[in-house]
């Protein structure tokens, strides 16, 4: 898994790390049991303070997305999300609406989003 930061986005670095772990999990580019970079390694790779990575990993661990084993590393967990089909659809509609709205404020079209989503899934 490769992390990338956008320091111009206005999104805090720790939040970008969290979002990228969730995105990689959702796209299938990482799966349960796969090891994440160490705090130190990710901090060096991203050129950020290790405390920033600790904050992101701590939040991911508190929500059950990752688990840390002293001496062996940090691993993605199996996060069972049990929702009914109706609830999944409602949540998906909400997320898509927010995504399209935010993109529209930036002058992007739905086609721009679809093209970027297609490219994103091919990268993963």
Image (cartoon, helix red, strand yellow):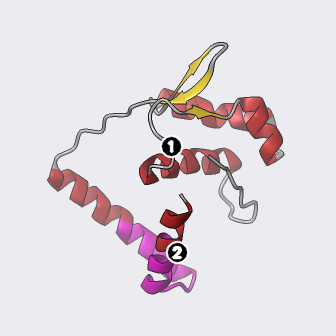
**Residue 48 seen in render:** no
Q: Is residue 42 above or below residue 11?
A: above
In the displayed orientation, state which residue is furthest to the front.
122
Q: Nearer the viewer, residue 97 or 23?
A: 23
34 vs 13: above or below? above
Whole-percent x, y for residue 26 in the image: 43, 50
- Residue 116: image tag: 2
**Circle 1 Cα neighbour tier, 10 Å, few/some/many (<14 / 14–19 / ≥20):** some
> Please, what is the dominant secondary structure of the magenta stretch?
helix
Secondary structure, mark 1, is loop
| Total numbered badges shown on the rendered structure | 2
Residue 110 on the magenta segment: yes
| Residue 76 magenta | no
Q: Secondary structure at mark 2?
A: helix
Q: Residue at x 74, y 65 (%)?
A: 8
Q: Nearer the viewer, residue 112 or 120?
A: 120
- What is the x, y in percent for residue 48? 81, 43
Residue named by callout 1: 30
Residue 9 left/right relative to 49: left
Does residue 40 appear in the picture of this structure? Answer: yes
47 left or right of 117? right
- Dot 2 or dot 1: first in sequence order is 1
Looking at the rendering, the stretch of residues picked out in magenta corresponds to 96-117
Residue 106 lies, with reference to residue 98, above or below; the image says: below
Residue 11 is drawn in which quadrant?
A: bottom right
Q: CA distance from mark 2 to mark 1?
A: 20 Å
Q: Residue at x 48, y 64 (%)?
A: 121
Write the residue at 56% across / 63% down: 123
Q: Residue 23 location, x and y as percent? A: 50, 52
């Amino acid at each position: 898994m490769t992390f990338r930061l956008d320091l111009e986005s206005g999104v805090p670095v720790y939040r970008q790390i969290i979002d990228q772990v969730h995105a990689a999990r959702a796209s299938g580019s990482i799966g349960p049991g796969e090891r994440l970079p160490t705090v130190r390694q990710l901090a060096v790779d991203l050129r950020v303070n290790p405390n920033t990575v600790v904050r992101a990993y701590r939040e991911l661990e508190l929500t059950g997305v990752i688990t840390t084993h002293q001496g062996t590393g940090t691993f993605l967990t199996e996060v069972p999300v049990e929702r009914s089909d109706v609830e999944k659809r409602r949540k998906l509609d909400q997320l898509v609406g927010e995504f399209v709205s935010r993109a529209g404020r930036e002058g992007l079209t739905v086609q721009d989003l679809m093209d970027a989503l297609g490219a994103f899934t091919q990268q993963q």
